Amino acid sequence: MERDKEIDLLLKREALKLWAQKFEKESRPIERDLRKEDVINLIKKIVEGDRTEEIVNTAIEYYGDVAIEVFKQIVQAYLKGKISKLSDVELYEILVRLGLRIPLKTRIKIVRHGEARDISEELRL
């Protein structure tokens, strides 16, 4: 009788292990090698903000494959559910903290009487 209980317990443990392995495989996102174009498109979808396009394109222009590898890591973390969507400011901060300095075009507008003008136009007056 006791031997039957031990066998049942062993069978239940094995069944639990198999079930856990199956569940882990199903819940894990499919990891595949992402092409350069896929990484760029996905990073642009993951990052929200007005300057996303400028940040991504400038990073690729200045740092090439290094920037792509950073973006790939971010995309993989997103696909695994480790991070959620990012803002353009957060992406910029990640790149700066990694030592990838990205110059962005700064625009200064002056608003007077409801009309917005570039500072260069304002200084000419």
Image: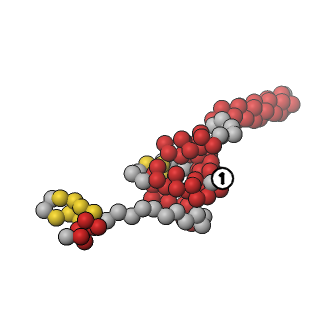
Q: Which residue is mark 1?
A: 65
Q: Is residue 44 left or right of residue 118?
A: right
Chosen colour scheme? secondary structure
> Does residue 89 show up?
yes
Of 101 and 43, nearer the camera is 101
For image coordinates 20% across by 63% down, the residue present is 111
Q: Is residue 68 left or right of residue 16?
A: left
In percent of width and height, residue 69 lies at 65, 52
Amino acid at pointer 1: Asp
Extreme residue in the right direction: 3
User: Where on the picture, by quarter, is residue 118?
Assistant: bottom left
User: In what element is the residue under mark 1?
Assistant: helix
In percent of width and height, residue 63 lies at 61, 58
- Mark 1 neighbour class, 10 Å CA radius: few under 14, some 14 to 19, many 20 or more: few
Of 66 and 122, nearer the camera is 122
Give the answer, above or below, for where 40 lies relative to 100: above
